[in-house]
Image (cartoon, rainbow, N blue to C red):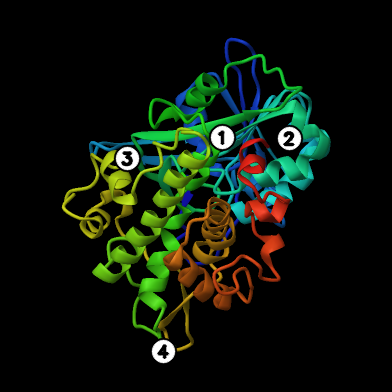
Amino acid sequence: MEVVPDSCKERTETFGIHVFLDNAVKIFGLMTQLAYTSASRENLDVNVLTLFQDEAERWTKLLEDNDLKISVTYNDGTESEILSKPSIITKDPAKAVEGVDIVFLVVPAFAHAQYFTTITPYLQPNTLIVGLPGQAGFEFQCRSMLGKKASTCTIASLESLPWACRILEFGKHVQILGFKESLGMSFLTGSECNLLFPVVETVQEVLGEKPHIQVIENYIAVNLMAKSIIHPPLLYGKWGDWDGTPVPEKPLFYQGVDEIQAELLSKVSDEVLATAKELAKLRNGCDMSEVIHIFDWYKIYYKDQVADKSSLMMAMRTNKAYDGLVHPMTPTEDGKFVPDFNYRYTSEDVPFGLVVMKGIAEIAGVETPTIDKIIAWAQTKLDKEYIVGSKLTGKDIASARAPQSYGLHTIDELFNM
């Protein structure tokens, strides 16, 4: 789910859940807002793992005499409030992972490596690892960091966030703004992994009725379906020619999209779609049909929340799930604002989004001039070098999640992980 703090300061807030189903499956996940599902189902019991400073201690203290309140706005406009309380909040991975069969990683992609490193020693054989969302390159990184344990695990990745959410008061109050209708998910089963529970049905049980999980047979398709393509083009369209002058207020992010930003996003989506089509040809007709244009995605996944579907720009501007969400900004001493280019919209969605898709496109032999331009701009803001000219040969490519970062350079290597 998407966490949109009222301030622009990035946070890594995590939580875990144990879910007791008919077959006694336990689930461990990461992120506060999934407390929603635990509260709405009697068979879910939540554990929290947070590695962020003293957050475990602070959160535990806050909930000693209070429940976590979840304010929910459903797609039909109705509202409700749910009260819940995690059973464990800890920064000890041994306690959090003990006896767990399913791991949910619902933290920003830049935090995945930290959590993989922390929990891998405690993972047991026949574990399901779910990226919610995995974001582009999740499978590459997960298999690499798990090492030999990867063959005993199943790795699943969902294409996007199931909800739009924000924190109203740390540790006490969160808000769910809207539910997606459906969500694509693929999974790779390790050669020595024998799960005792069904993957899709179990994850659906955790998420609830919506979004409906749609199984994607091809994991590369899910990588190309990742919605990390959205933020960088909108940032580039807004701030690409910015002269450094502070602005008087935080501009709306999605609902402030103009024609230039929408065109950039559309061109990025065109290049991703071209990559998918070329892969289908090169891989003897492998199914890439679920990779669709971003405008079509908005019309399908937000069909009840978008008021004007006449264009991509209007679909974003009239999406009620985006009400009030603003650009990540940093305040100046005189009360104005400047863009925060270190926010996850760039620091995550470029190395763990556009760079990954560029890497897949390179393997497919597809040119991506718009993606190249945006990566080249963003890497200057991040003080990184991923792309040189039109090739991913920059000195920092190893810190991104492109397939090339993990030694994958051919079509066969890409599809036969």
Q: Which mark is residue 243?
A: 4
Q: Is residue 258 above or below residue 181?
A: below
**Residue 173 at least partly seen:** no
Secondary structure of the residue carrying tag 1 is loop
Q: Position of residue 306 (x, y in %)?
A: 22, 47
Q: Which residue is mark 3?
A: 301
Between discs 3 and 1, the one toward the N terminus: 1
Mark 3 vs mark 2: in front: 3
State yes or no: discs 3 and 1 in contact (Cβ < 8 Å).
no
Q: Is residue 305 left or right of residue 291?
A: left
Distance from disc 4 to disc 1, alpha carbons, whole Å, reads 47 Å
Distance from disc 3 to disc 4, alpha carbons, whole Å, reads 36 Å
Give, as a three-letter code, the residue at label 4: Asp
Q: Which residue is mark 1?
A: 85
Residue at figure coordinates x 26%, y 51% from the top left: 319
State yes or no: discs 3 and 4 in contact (Cβ < 8 Å).
no
Secondary structure of the residue carrying tag 4 is loop
Tell me the crowding category of disc 1: few under 14, some 14 to 19, or many 20 or more residues within 10 angstroms, Cα based: many
Q: Which mark is residue 96?
A: 2
Distance from disc 3 to disc 2, alpha carbons, whole Å, reads 34 Å
Secondary structure of the residue carrying tag 3 is helix
Residue at figure coordinates x 32%, y 68% from the top left: 261
Between discs 4 and 2, the one toward the N terminus: 2
Residue 155: quadrant of the picture: top right
Q: Is residue 90 left or right of residue 328?
A: right
Q: Is residue 232 left or right of residue 258?
A: right
Q: Which mark is residue 263?
A: none
Secondary structure of the residue carrying tag 2 is helix
Q: Is residue 82 above or below residue 333?
A: above
Q: Position of residue 97 (x, y in %)?
A: 74, 32
State yes or no: discs 4 and 2 in contact (Cβ < 8 Å).
no
Between discs 1 and 2, the one toward the N terminus: 1
